[in-house]
Amino acid sequence: MDNNHFPPGMVILVGAGPGDPDLLTIGALKIIKAAEVVVYDALVSQEIVDMIPAKAEKILAGKRGGGHSVKQEDITSLLVKFGKENRRVVRLKGGDPFVFGRGGEEACRLAEENIPFKVVPGLTSGIAGPAYAGIPVTHREVNANFAFITGHESLSNTSDKNPDDEHPSRIDWEGVARTFPVIVLYMAMRNVDSVRKRMLAAGRSTDTPVALIRWATTPRQQTLVTTLGKVSKDIKAVGMRPPAIMIIGNVVNYRDILKWFPDETLIPPEE
Ligand code: SAH
């Protein structure tokens, strides 16, 4: 990427990957180095934030489940404003910008405003996170498909609807439980118990293996291995908090053979 491919006034939505700087793409790194202003999320790891050139303006516009958050409209408007100011703008997002990261909304607004933009996909935490915990999202012997679901969706039962949610549930949990042997849940901590109940109600067994991987691919990675029957209790017992990916299905069992990542903390420690 030379500066001709990143002219002033362009906004580039860049996926930073899940955290480990080795998982940043070469394209992403070149663009970060050429940026004049970088608007980044709370999920972007510190090592990657440290790669932003000192001369560039850095703006943390992160959203973090439960914590301080900047309104999405304000973030998008900031991108539009910087674009109109003819700066080279990078919107740096955790994982892949178009996977539950509202990158789609940001890109639509840029398109509407006629601001030139590009997208640099990143490695999504729903695949890389389990991999760093020794869990393949597919294995021939287990699954021929997998589902990516956001735990942020409000649930179909209005009584457990999250007041922050703007849309009613679009997830047919019963259908999901029946169709997908492996389910990867983003923003998992929000609705774990409702998801668990729905999976069990749809006939998934209480023994179904479940793993939660927090701060995946970073030195702070924590992994909890449990089952659909015990997941809520175990989360409480170990006090696991976001950000975490939850993976449900028999692929979790491969961890016993494939666990390779040395830096994780197991909670609770495995016997
Ligand atoms: N665009 C991102 C997802 C944004 S939604 C991606 O492609 O990965 C935010 C959710 O992503 C978090 O709540 C968490 O479930 C997940 N997530 C992102 N990075 C993570 C990491 N390093 N470890 C565990 N979960 C992560």
Image (spheres, rainbow, N blue to C red):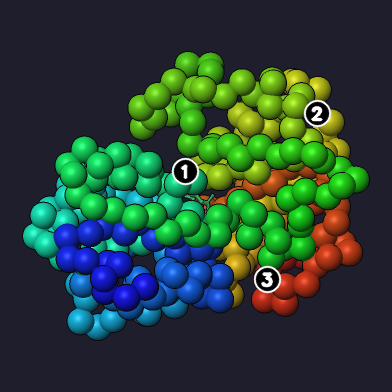
Residue 69 against residue 21 in the figure, above or below:
above
Looking at numbered disc 1 in the image, what kind of residue is underneath it?
Phe
Residue 116 against residue 55 in the figure, above or below:
above
Q: Tag 2's secondary structure?
A: loop
Read off the residue under disc 2: 204
Q: Nearer the viewer, mark 1 or mark 3?
A: 1
Read off the residue under disc 3: 264
Question: Distance between the Cα atoms at labels 2 and 3?
Answer: 29 Å
Question: Distance between the Cα atoms at labels 2 and 1?
Answer: 25 Å
> Percent position (x, y) of residue 99?
49, 46
Res 179 → quadrant: top right
Q: In the image, is the residue at mark 1 within 8 Å of ligand 1 by its beta carbon?
A: yes
The residue at the point 31 percent across, 45 percent down is 107
> Percent position (x, y) of residue 184?
65, 43
Q: Tag 3's secondary structure?
A: loop
Read off the residue under disc 1: 100
> Percent position (x, y) of residue 251?
81, 49
If you read the primary sequence from the N terminus, does the residue marked by circle 2 or circle 1 appear first? 1
